[in-house]
Image: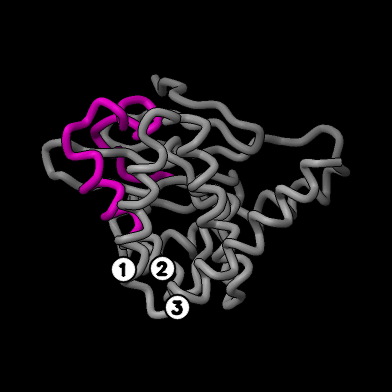
């Protein structure tokens, strides 16, 4: 019997042996035909992103795609989500730098994750690898703005989930991210994104 290990707004994640199955949830507020179409499109789009990302960085590789059932079957990654134990790890700076380098590789290949948080990263202490998971909100974009927002989301996630270490972790992430050929452009745009955020927050 499959065991539910996560439940989100868009999907349910079940563990099945050495794999996990991501099932997109029916949205009752949408017209049934539209809901069917959207869930099928998003399943296909996420599968393509994961396939592309798997040639670049550690991710949970796809075992099966079922567009009719709106399911993705992926390899199970041993370890814990970084959100749960990042602050306790002795090598957290090394991990953050590697995450930055992985993000740089995604961005250099125009993959925007869309929800780049430590809740979507699994660290395996046996291999020393950090796998980025859940590309459900991801998309392809060459825009510097989209990549800057991706980094901004990660920075905010560090501040929210890891307040004691966020500055140290973010600096390490940036050191890794600077391996991107467009790092300076993205980080410069990030400053503009953050200024807009502060401006909006005043009102």
Q: For mark 3, what is the residue? A: 182
Q: In the image, residue 98 lies at what x, y percent?
A: 26, 55
Q: Does the segment drawn in magenta span residue 95?
A: yes
Mark 3, residues whose alpha carbon is within 10 Å: few (<14), some, or many (≥20)? some
Position of residue 4 relative to residue 179, above or below, is above
Question: How far apart are labels 1 and 3 at the CA level?
Answer: 20 Å
Question: How far apart are labels 2 and 3 at the CA level?
Answer: 20 Å
Tell me, for residue 52, which label it has, or none: 2
Question: Please, what secondary structure does the residue beneath circle 1 have?
Answer: loop
Residue nearest the viewer, comparing 45 with 189: 189
Q: Earlier in the sequence, mark 2 or mark 3?
A: 2
In this picture, residue 93 sits left or right of residue 150: left
Residue nearest the viewer, comparing 85 with 69: 85
> Magenta part of the protein: which range?
73-100
Mark 1, residues whose alpha carbon is within 10 Å: few (<14), some, or many (≥20)? few
Q: For mark 1, what is the residue? A: 55
Q: How is the image coloured?
A: one colour
Q: Mark 2 and mark 1 in contact (Cβ < 8 Å)?
A: yes
Question: How far apart are labels 1 and 2 at the CA level?
Answer: 6 Å
Which quarter of the rendered picture does the C terminus lie within? top right
- Residue located 55% across and 26% down the image: 7
């Amino acid at each position: 019997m499959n065991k539910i290990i996560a439940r989100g707004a868009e999907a349910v994640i079940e563990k099945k042996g050495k794999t996990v199955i991501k099932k997109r949830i029916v949205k009752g507020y949408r017209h049934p035909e539209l809901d069917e179409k959207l869930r099928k499109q998003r399943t296909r789009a996420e599968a393509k992103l994961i396939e592309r990302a798997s040639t670049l960085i550690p991710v949970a590789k796809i075992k099966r795609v079922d567009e009719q059932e709106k399911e993705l079957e992926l390899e199970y990654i041993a370890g814990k989500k970084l959100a749960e134990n990042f602050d306790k790890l002795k090598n957290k700076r090394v991990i953050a730098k590697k995450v930055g380098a992985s993000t740089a590789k995604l961005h250099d290949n125009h993959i925007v994750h869309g929800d780049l948080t430590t809740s979507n990263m699994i660290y395996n202490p046996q291999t020393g690898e950090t796998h980025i998971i859940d590309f459900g909100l991801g998309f392809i974009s060459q825009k510097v703005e989209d990549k800057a927002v991706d980094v901004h989301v990660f920075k905010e996630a560090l501040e929210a989930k890891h307040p004691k270490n966020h500055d140290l972790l973010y600096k390490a992430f940036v050191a890794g991210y600077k391996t991107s050929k467009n790092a300076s452009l993205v980080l410069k745009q990030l400053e503009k994104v953050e200024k807009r955020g502060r401006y909006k927050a005043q009102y």
